[in-house]
Image: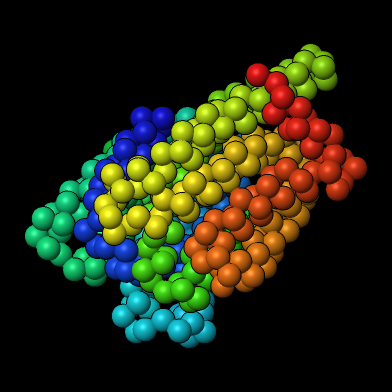
Amino acid sequence: MFAEQILRMVAGLLVGIWVARYLGSEQFGVFSYAIAFASLFSSIAKLGLDGIVVRDLVKEPELRDVYLGTAFWLKLIGALLMLGIVAIAMQLTTSDSLTNLYILIIASGAIFQSFEVIDFYFQSKVLSKFVSICKMTQLFISSLFKLYFIFTGGELIYFVLITLVDQVTLSLSLYIAYRFQKLGSFYRCFNKSIAKQLLKESWSLVFNGLIIMVYMRIDQIMIKQMLGESELGLFSAAVRLSEVWYFIPVIISTSLFPSIVNAKKISDELYYKRLQRLYTFMIWLAIIIALPMTFLSNWLVILLYGEDYRGAGQVLTIHIWAGVFVFIGVASSKWFISEGLQRHLTINTVVGAIINVILNLFLIPKYGIYGAAIATVISQALASYVMNILFRRTYLNFFRITRSVFSY
């Protein structure tokens, strides 16, 4: 899994930057806008089933085909619902018909995400290496297609179609891996009572997913509507370099947190001591990444993207500091779940998303894409850090995070 993430990061930097250079800031802005708009509604297609289905497969492995088949058809219905909502939402924007076509092509990839249920099976059997191999295969094919169209002078529509091909390739490789296990045809199974139970448990996760995607992508939507495609291209280029590090806290937290939870069985003192160490490690790791990126941002952007993207350097100087609060948020989210405080986590995310929209409304007209970067840093700080002080059950977490800044 770690190898796959490293390969994805390298491919994202090398091939992704090559694509951005080839398309130019305006075309890359259109491409980024289409992806951001489609992903805004992606949680509807996913239906929040991921963790729930994995849990049930572990508990009742004998019902494998029923759970997989039921989840498959629910996700397919969710994908079709998402496409309908995307089509309606597009009518509320000022985008031209060609841009709307790009959005629909990218959004239609959600139909093939129904085969993600195979990933759930492999997770339940602790066989994630098969999924990683499938994803690396998809990444390799995708990168080859992108390089081919760069060398042959392909138009933007071809790079849009590649995003759809990515989903088809991943679905096909997952299905081949599943059949390689000599298992049954799950898609022939559907259980109405299980479907109702899955939806009953997952609706709040769908809502939370929508809020998170608004949080992560609304700035790009607003930049395109307020400033145009070229400015969005510059902002997206900076964000790509800033967010490339975000897989690190996920892997570290996932690896270390089981030992932190087990420490609670021994004593609260050991539990919070290990939690404090995790926070300290995360914060200083994020700072170590942010500091050199701050001073080298202009040079790095021109080196990687070219002179056409010079304006993205200052955006990166600001946006990279959102990573400090992302690292904090990923680590502390594990604590929220461990303590059964998911409701507070949702409240923090909702407030962060609302603040992000409000700040963008005020700062983008005044400061352009730099205002959007400032809005991201402030809203991330509020959601991941400051909001903790407002609730009786979380305010001590605020002081633990604060203490971590002065611990090394």
Looking at the image, which is closer to me, 107 or 157? 157
Residue 120: x, y in percent?
48, 43
Q: Residue furthest right?
A: 392
Please say which color scheme the image uses.
Answer: rainbow
Question: 129 or 219, which lies in front?
Answer: 219
> Residue drawn 49% across and 46% down?
317
Q: Tell whether 283 sits left or right of 239.
A: right
**Residue 331 picture location, percent across and down:** 64, 34
In the rendered image, is residue 65 in sight? no
Disc tally is 0
**What's the residue at 81%, 33% (across, down)?**
399
Residue at horizontal 72 percent and vertical 50 percent from the top:
382
Does 192 sit above or below residue 389?
below
The residue closer to the viewer here, 254 or 123, is 254
Where is the C terminus found, in terms of image quarters? top right
Q: Quadrant of the N terminus?
A: top left
Specify whether 143 is left or right of 338. Answer: left
Indicate left or right for 265 with 74 as reference: right
Residue 202 found in image quarter: bottom right
Tell me if residue 229 can be seen. yes
Q: What residue sits 42% from the left and 65% below the top? A: 232
- Residue 259, percent from left and from top: 65, 20
x and y percent of residue 244 in the render? Answer: 43, 42
Q: Quadrant of residue 376?
A: bottom right
Residue at the left extreme of this rendering: 152
